[in-house]
Image (spheres, rainbow, N blue to C red):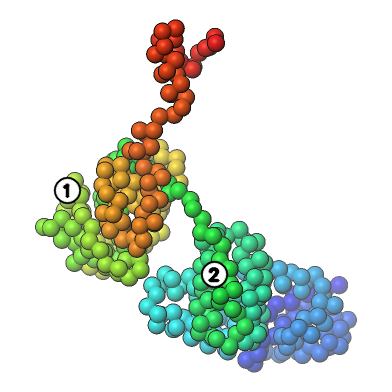
Amino acid sequence: MAKVSVTEGHHQGKKVYLIEFRYNHELIQQVKSIGCIWSKSRGKWYLNFNKENEQLLKNLFPSEIKRLNAAKQTKTKLTSDDFDKETLKIIHAYVKYLRGKLYSESTVKSYYNHILEFLYYTKGRPIETLSNRDVELFVEDVYLSRKYSASTHRQVISAIRHFKNLYSDCLIDNVALDSPEKSRFLPSVLAKEEVLRLLQVTQNLKHRAILALLYSAGLRIGELINLKLSHIDISRRQLIVKSGKGRKDRYVILANSFLPLLNNYLFSYKPEIYFVEGTKAGEPYTAGSIRNFLRKSCKKAGIRKLVTPHTLRHSYATHLLENGVDIRYIQVLLGHSRPETTMVYTHVAKRDMLAIESPLDTMVKTFMETDNGDKKLTISRDLNL
């Protein structure tokens, strides 16, 4: 039998199945028998998109419908062509609603992508028929199969809750929607010697200034990219982070040792608006570029840990704590809303942890101090006990 391709698309403003194959008299008779219509403009046969027609196609071309349904669950690059006009109106209204709530553009983009995939998964069904079971199936079939993290799962549920708030006619019950427990991973942190080595091997002046500021001020990568020259006050040795996470402003101290590097960088590169700019003057630098040269610098420095720009922020907070800075001040410097967020650094700081003696050390020391004890006892040789 000739090769058949079944895809989803739109024809004359309606969502349809598009059936394509080389001329074959037998196949033509089969598709005609289930109501398919020839489109001269598309050069394909088409059938209106609904459950009944899906079953008819499944009976004729089972392997193609199976492939199509599997592709629906894994497709990650969605475009406007994947939706009809009514669904696109719903999506645009949702984005407008989120912006009206003054969410950051990164949050709007994340929620938009989640809802895009949810509506694609529900196959164009009327939104008033969508229920909590549809959300559960969406997570099970799409997100679990991609092995996304618990934090992404929580973000999906949050996006759908906002969708329900906007479209109250749908059957989704926000109260009954379950979010997974937030993962409690300890942050990856560089040793102080590793930070210095990282800066030393970064020869490019702009790149070194970026890494030094990320670490010395504990900035998020988005905060550094959006940092304007007008936000830096060298005379007062501070900068202001405008509209950080949670739309909060905060002041951050500039390190004395960073000021010569800062002046050298500003004199050499002469940025116009932002602290660091891209190839075009007045345009912000990209996060991808920072990640790329950071990865190369880590390789040169012989650092085998997985290091991201946020690792430098984690290292800044941990080193402050190890230097004896009160955790309440660290919370303010980092711009955390809740002290619980900052408390995670107490689990990785070495200052207090190193003061705790292992019971093995205590046992060896006690034995050495006894009259009959071996004054040179080590556990690296035969104990002969």
Snapshot quadrant of residue 3: bottom right
Residue 49 screen position, x and y as percent: 71, 85
Snapshot quadrant of residue 253: bottom left
For label 1, count other residues whose C-alpha is less than 10 Å away and answer few (under 14), some (14-19) or many (20+): few
Residue found at the far front of this picture: 371
Residue at horizontal 74%, vertical 69%? 67
Mark 2 residue element? helix
Q: Is residue 343 above or below residue 96?
A: above
Residue 377 screen position, x and y as percent: 44, 13
- In the rendered image, is residue 27 in sight? yes
Q: Which mark is first along the chain, 1 or 2?
A: 2
Q: Tell me which amino acid carries mark 2.
A: Val
- Near-viewer residue (269 or 52): 52
Marks 2 & 1, CB-CB < 8 Å contact: no
Q: Is residue 329 above or below residue 380?
A: below
Mark 2 or 1: the one toward you = 2
Residue found at the far top of this picture: 372
Figure disc tally: 2
Residue at horizontal 52%, vertical 12%? 383
For label 2, count other residues whose C-alpha is less than 10 Å away and answer few (under 14), some (14-19) or many (20+): many
Mark 1 residue element? helix
Q: CA distance from mark 2 to mark 1?
A: 43 Å
Q: Which residue is labeled 2 in the image?
A: 156
The disc label shown at residue 375, or none: none
Q: Quadrant of the C terminus?
A: top right
Residue found at the far left of this picture: 235
Q: Which residue is labeled 1 in the image?
A: 256
